[in-house]
Amino acid sequence: MYPFVVFVLLLLNWIIFSGKFDAFHLGLGVISCLFVTWISQDFLFYDRSKGLKERMHEAWAFLCYIPWLTWEVVLANIHVLKLAMTNKGYMEMAPRVVTIKTILKTDFAKFVFANSITLTPGTITMLVRGDIIHVHVMSQFLEDDLLSGAIEKKVAEIFEPGVLQKA
Amino acid sequence: MLKKKRKEQERKMKDSSFIPVLAETMTSSLNDLNIIQIFGFLLGVLGLIFFLGAAVGMLRFPDFYTRMHAAGKGDSMSTMLMLSGLGLVTMEDYSLGSWLVFVKIMGIVLFIYLTSPTSTHVLMKAAFEDNHMPLDEKDLKKAKGKKK
Amino acid sequence: MIDWFAMLVGGSLFLFMVPLLYRIWVGPTAYDRILAVNVIGTKTAVLLVVIGALFDRVHMFVDFAIAYALLNFLASVVVSRYLNRTAAERNVEEKTKGARA
């Protein structure tokens, strides 16, 4: 089943990027997508024990997560604009490194968590080693915000609902 | 219809001076705009403002890690806003071809959304393992004193 | 009107790239320079789409922009990996020198 999903995703990409709908181009697309799927279908979707229903649920939850993330990106940019343009924001700046420990287990969830930290205001992930994450933050206020762990909870709700119940 | 308009404009161009004609063409093209295009203009100008913030931050911040904050965020956001604004502006008719172009532009946006944090993270890791430590408070005070 | 908008956006992009060029010129470390090059590359992808809007060939220039964004990302990742590796080698050399002496 997973090879079929990979094939459909590749074909969708082909259709968008070629922009031609006659039989010749579509046939070329089907042939090349079949070839690529045959060579490298095991690169996508590392954990294959999950069923299709669970995956669809994950994808839907992730799509719902994106607007919230976009709003966070807007906030981050207003924050950086304030720091760069006004003198008062420049004086408030106090960069430091904070170490936090995650409850997330799988690599993909950690990847989403680290990228979300990078996109939220005033925080950037520096290093991820095992379940310890070093974060560079701009000021004290943001550090408190980070340590409250709102992003981690959101990511855990999407990808690993089991972890939350244990903790 | 269009040809008639153009001919009239050309005749006016010959007859009168340059500036009133320019104003007239601008206002007439403003009347032709629909609301989606105006929204696109607004998005583009907002993106320019955010990019100005990123550039000033790159110039002004005291050390590499703080410059990373300016570059990594202002860059992705301003690219997103400007590209979606351009995508909305260049949609002339709502045919399949123009929709495909719009989806491709959104594909660039998605790609940059994915890769910008990754390249930021890789650069930061490289700098950290090359023994460039972030500023501590003494150095920060020195840097701020210089600015004053 | 699209022409006016494209000229405005393209000209301002060029204007705002000047501080980044300054950062490339004087940047204290190599990492500052790569960072500024990365930002300029991303903005060049936007500039390609603007040029497409000026010439009424957006469907063609969008493909160039995609390729440019891809190459830009690859370039920044490869250069930082290279610097990372040379830094690690230097660290190992220093440690072995200390062990001999």
Image: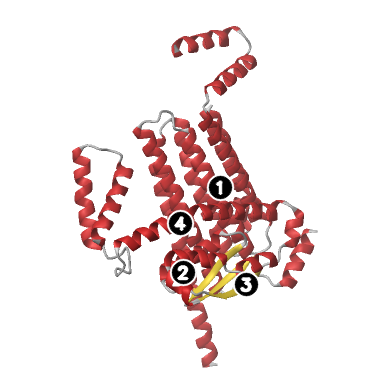
Q: Given this view, does label 1 or label 2 mark the residue nearer the observer?
A: 2
Tell me which amino acid carries mark 4: Leu
Q: CA distance from mark 3 to mark 2?
A: 19 Å
Residue type highlighted by circle 1: Ser
Q: Specify the label residue A97 is tagged with.
A: 3
Amino acid type at mark 3: Val
Question: Are the residues tagged 3 and 2 within 8 Å (C-beta)?
Answer: no
Q: Nearer the viewer, mark 3 or mark 2?
A: 2
Q: Residue at x 36, y 31 (%)?
A: B95
Callout 4: chain? B
Q: Residue B114 shows which numbered tag?
A: 4
Marks 4 and 2: CB-CB under 8 Å?
A: no
User: Could one spot residue B122 in this view of the protein?
Assistant: no
Which is more N-terminal, label 2 or label 3?
3
Label 1 – label 2 distance at C-alpha: 26 Å
Residue B29 image position (x, y, % from top left): 54, 21
Task: Estimate the spatial distance between the alpha carbons at disc 1 and disc 3, rounded to whole Å.
Answer: 27 Å
Q: Which mark identifies residue C43? A: none
Q: Residue at x 24, y 60 (%)?
A: A3
Secondary-structure class at tag 3: strand
Residue at 20%, 56% (x, y): give it: A35
Query: Label for residue A110?
Result: 2
Q: Amino acid at mark 2?
A: Lys
Q: Indicate which disc residue B78 carries.
A: 1
